[in-house]
Amino acid sequence: MNLNDIRASWAALRGVTGLGPIHDDEGYTRMVELADALIDSGLAGEGGELSGLFGLVSGLIADYDDRQYQLPQASPRDMLRFFMEQHGLTQSDLPEIGSQGVVSEILSGRRMLNARQIAALVARFGVSADLFIEPATGHSH
């Protein structure tokens, strides 16, 4: 492995692509444009000449997204409360979950959402079921 060859090649590749860790929105935009160009070229697919480069660029984009857009850890009942507020819903406006009393128990933490209720919320709000599933705590109740 000749580091001088690698250094020269890396400098050339970086100069052409801007490839490297993403530190800001400008770098993010540059990597997304590179990823799009690689896809459009037809060379980024499985076994394509530039599939390895596409994998690296995609990884850099995903890492930046994970750092920038971490979702706050909210309980399922907090998520339900959030969606109710966003959509101007009262406890009586969710018959697919149950009666107003059932919704009240869920919001107060006295009752957990079941699979049927979670499926109904996913269908209603078009979001991931993960938002309404209690995180595993490592101990049983």
Image (cartoon, rainbow, N blue to C red):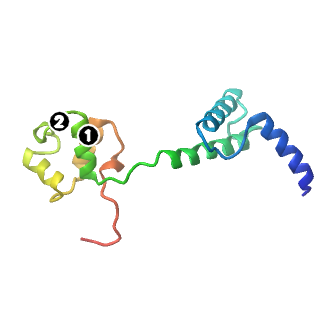
Q: Amino acid at mark 1?
A: Phe
Q: Are marks 2 and 1 in contact (CB under 8 Å)?
A: yes
* 71 to 141, vertically: above or below: above
Count neighbours of disc 1 (C-alpha within 10 A) and say few if under 14, some if 14 to 19, many if 20 or more.
Answer: some
Q: Which picture quadrant has residue 127? A: top left
Q: Which picture quadrant has residue 32? A: top right
Residue 122 x %, y %: 30, 41
Split into 4 quadrants, where in the image is the C terminus? bottom left
Left or right: residue 97 versus residue 129 is left
Which residue is more in the foreground, 123 or 28? 28
User: Which residue is depicted at the point 41% across and 48% down?
Assistant: 71
Q: Secondary structure at mark 2?
A: loop
Count neighbours of disc 2 (C-alpha within 10 A) and say few if under 14, some if 14 to 19, many if 20 or more.
Answer: few
Q: Total marks drawn?
A: 2
* 122 to 132, vertically: above or below: above
Cα–Cα gap, marks 2 and 1: 8 Å
Q: Secondary structure at mark 1?
A: helix
Q: Which residue is mark 2?
A: 89
Residue 4 x %, y %: 92, 52
Q: Which residue is mark 1?
A: 83
User: Which residue is depicted at the point 61% across and 37% down?
Assistant: 28
Q: Amino acid at mark 2?
A: Leu
User: Which residue is depicted at the point 23% across and 33% down?
Assistant: 87
Split into 4 quadrants, where in the image is the N terminus? bottom right
Which mark is first along the chain, 1 or 2? 1
- Please give the label number shown on residue 68: none
Left or right: residue 128 versus residue 83 is right
Which residue is more in the foreground, 81 or 113? 81
User: Which residue is depicted at the point 15% across and 59% down?
Assistant: 110
Residue 79 x %, y %: 28, 47
Work out which residue is located at the far top of the displayed protein and give it. Answer: 40
